[in-house]
Image (cartoon, helix red, strand yellow):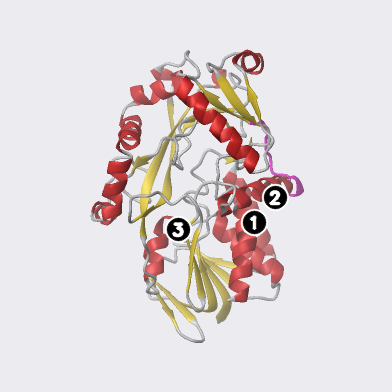
Amino acid sequence: MIYDFAVIGSGIVGISVAYNILQKSPRAKIIILEKEPEALSHQSSHNSGVVHSGLYYHPDSQKAKFCKLGLEKTFTFCKENNIKFNQCGKLVVATNPSEIERLHELWNNANNNGLSLEIFSKAKLNKIEPNLEGEEALLSPKTGVIDWYIFGKALLDKYLMMGGSIKYNFHVSYIEEDDKLIQIKNQNVDLIKSKKMVCCGGLQSDRLSKMLGIQLNLKIVPFRGDYFILDRKFSDIFNHLIYPVPENDMPFLGIHFTKTIDNFMILGPNASVNFSREDYNRFYVNFKDIYDYLSYDGFWKLILKYKKFVGNEFLTSFSKIYYLKQTKKYFKSLSLKDLRPYRAGIRAQAVLSDGTLANDFIFEKTKRALFVINAPSPAATSSLPIGDFISDKILQL
């Protein structure tokens, strides 16, 4: 069989692309290729479950545009498909003068993004969050939480009901393109032929693009995010999600308090360089993955440029005491025994050759293929409009 479209990767973005293609071209023969035994195995199911509003992002960026639209589309999809969500709102909290200054800069950016948000004084903050330590806070009322795995599974089910197909345990090892077809082989030399291809490879996106000779000015570096979960007695300490004021020029938002859709309170994530792209054991070492970034000049430029941040995050990853210290600035009553191990996530972070962290979407294309090289957070929130955008691109290719 020759497919009309092949999509590599069954994360939320890959599923959304396939779903959107079928919506626009219902008779198309399309297949999703996934190397794991099930869909949504990595970033799509290893996250804090937040639906973001777009207050952090540069007004002219694709990320800002996709996020604002994605929030509305996500909650609409949840309502139409009976998926639980909680639009509880988020507070970005400043605890000292320097953070207050950055908080006001963030407020200006949010206004430029068309978000009319309010800054709360300490007195007003104490009324809505009596357990919270903070001097000022920016309220994002539309931010919410869902289970992204359940969301992605519902989207996949709709795609399959529309006639799409998916093949698991298909680890792409070779891609070839000519004037008529894309040929994709796996580790067992099974062959998939398709007229066009979209690659949503996540943590492997740079490696997959090289199979068609694409030269990139970046490398994917795996950043690990560790989470802890609190006992049920802490589930209602806050009414909103509690976030720190982010560091300037950093795409990582910092350790935050998030109430899950099942009414647990979780802490995290931090952002420390991992020893593997896809293994969640903190001490597992993948020498190929480590060599990839240790031999990359852009990685060392990143370390030198952000050494204070990198060092801080490294400490939170290996020291529970230091991790706790980051959270006690907002809620002093936590102790080490209150932090119970929870899942970890690994983020695919594109690092440019000058050491800059790419914080917007990056796409590359050939005659018959489109590669999603960088799909930064909040890619899950933005998944429906991203899928719409990419499906238009591949249909026009």
Number of the label disc, if any, that sits on residue 240? none
Assign a secondary structure to mark 1. helix
Q: Which residues are magenta?
A: 79-89
Q: Amino acid at mark 2?
A: Lys
Specify whether residue 338 is painted magenta: no
Q: Main secondary structure of the magenta part?
A: loop
On the image, the x and y values in percent for residue 5 come to: 57, 74
Q: Tell me the distance, in whole angstroms, between the alpha carbons under discs 2 and 3.
A: 28 Å
Mark 2 or 3, closer to the camera: 2
Disc 3 marks which residue?
36
Whether the residues at callouts 1 and 2 have beta carbons within 8 Å, the answer is yes
Q: Residue at x 36, y 58 (%)?
A: 218
Dot 1, crowdedness within 10 Å: few (<14), some or many (≥20)?
many
The mark that comes first in sequence, 1 or 2, is 2
Q: Is 9 placed above or below 77 here?
A: below
Count the numbered circles shown.
3
The mark that comes first in sequence, 3 or 1, is 3
Residue at the far right: name it.
Answer: 80
Number of the label disc, if any, that sits on residue 385? 1
Q: Residue at x 26, y 54 (%)?
A: 297
Q: Amino acid at mark 3?
A: Glu
Disc 2 marks which residue?
73
Quadrant in which residue 18 is drawn: bottom right
Q: Amino acid at mark 1?
A: Pro
Dot 2, crowdedness within 10 Å: few (<14), some or many (≥20)?
some
Return the residue nearer the eye: 365 or 292: 365
On the image, the x and y values in percent for residue 395 come to: 62, 74
On the image, the x and y values in percent for residue 268 come to: 46, 32
Q: Tell me the distance, in whole angstroms, between the alpha carbons under discs 1 and 2.
A: 8 Å
